[in-house]
Amino acid sequence: MTKPPMLTAQQALDHLLSHAKPVDESENLAMQAALGRVLAENINSLVDVPPLDNTSMDGYALRTADTQTPGSILKIAQRIPAGSMGRQLEPGTAARIFTGAPVPAGADAVVMQEDCMIPEGSADQVQVNIAPTVGQWIRKQGEDLTAGKTALRAGSFLRPQELGVAASAGLTHLNVKRRVRVAAFFTGDELSLPGESLKPGGIYNSNRDTLLACLKSLGCDATDFGIVPDNLNATRETLRKASKDHDLIITSGGVSVGEEDHIKPAVTAEGRLDLWQIAIKPGKPLAFGAVRKSEGAKEGGTEAWFIGLPGNPVSSFVTFLLFVRPFILKLQGREEDRVQAYPMRADFDWLKADRRNEFLRVKINAQGGLDLFPNQSSGVLTSASWGDGLVDCPPGQAFKAGDIVKYIPFNALLS
Ligand code: AMP
Ligand code: MG
């Protein structure tokens, strides 16, 4: 049998992303319901934000020409609380003004009240103890958003701050991409669900909870097709069912080329498949392909994408984060599909470099460096639960404590 080609992580990712296309359908949601979704179109602001020049301090609006020398005294001619409009500021006068209130025409600076004094016995006058500069403490009209201009771009992932921007632009509802629908199933005769009794030689299905929760974190509609035994017909039948209403099918286990690995023949019979060896650790085997949809399937094309992950719990988790997540982000129409690695100091030696690109489970320590989980086996899922993220260690690269390495936080990979 010919060995499948060995790809770098980058080649595998580029190949996956070259296939993924954003889903077409969108829906109109009220602002709060749009949290965690992806904007389907650019939105333009309905207003200038702020709507007028306004003060960012409680104090006095005045003309800098009247206060060239510290100690100048001005008449307080008007009072402008937030939410009301002042009138033209006459030369030699000041307006008592409060944060958020529009700066009156004629004023070109605000002096905060801490820099002013009311002279003894003259409550209608203010002594300005500094020589203010033009524009000080004034927030300019439209400095945040401009009416008619783009406030948020199509493809933006909607976090709380994006919802706030959309609200300040005057919107109540947003057009967002529909959720991506993902089916998942888990292969292995040895698997039982927690709550069931373990078979002799059996283990609990942990990938189900890890992977379904990953899908949920990414805002997918996830359907669990359960544990599928290691046989060809059961695998084919589940693929047919799962392809029906889903954009993507993911599985764990059965992607090696042993006698008990049925993913390759099953997906090949129901569609098409490439089995890749990726030069990463943990991970390595990954299957990518597509399953034909049966007739009468709903929207979403004539095929469901297929990604088969390895069975070992850390391998399936890490390969999900590195490969499935960006693929899903692209289906979701999200603008950014690659994740940023940050330079961080390793506080441990990594002397036995591997030929493969390793992803080490690490945790940030109180000194701002990274500690390594002692057992990096692909079956030890507690390494990922202990850890804050991964060190992306290039092939063949050893390093010593104190060296700068590439760190990817789990948080950045789970939304
Ligand atoms: P496989 O990729 O099917 O050869 O499985 C590799 C290893 O991962 C084996 O030790 C399996 O028992 C284990 N494994 C496979 N699927 C799961 C799962 N869903 N939960 C926990 N361990 C699994
Ligand atoms: Mg298996």
Image: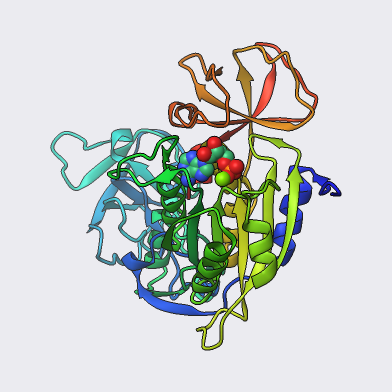
Residue extending farthest to the front is: 200
* Residue 266 lies in quadrant: bottom right
Q: Residue at x 58, y 79 (%)?
A: 293
Residue extending farthest to the right is: 2
Question: How many numbered marks appear?
Answer: 0
From the top left corner, tell me how far across and down residue 211 is, in percent: 47, 49
From the top left corner, tell me how far across and down residue 228 is, in percent: 48, 57
Q: Residue at x 57, y 53 (%)?
A: 325
Q: Is residue 153 visible?
A: no
Q: How is the image coloured?
A: rainbow
Would you place residue 58 above or below residue 179 in this image? above
Q: Is residue 368 visible?
A: yes
Residue extending farthest to the left is: 121
Seen from the viewer's position, the closer of residues 328 and 256 is 256
Q: Residue at x 33, y 34 (%)?
A: 115
From the top left corner, tell me how far across and down residue 413 is, in percent: 53, 44
Would you place residue 67 above or below residue 360 in this image? below
Seen from the viewer's position, the closer of residues 101 and 70 is 101
Seen from the viewer's position, the closer of residues 78 and 65 is 78
Seen from the viewer's position, the closer of residues 401 and 385 is 385
Ligand 2 found in image quarter = top right
Would you place residue 372 above or below residue 120 in this image? above
* Residue 403 lies in quadrant: top right
* Residue 149 lies in quadrant: bottom right
From the top left corner, tell me how far across and down residue 70 is, in percent: 40, 33
Would you place residue 113 above or below residue 345 in this image? below
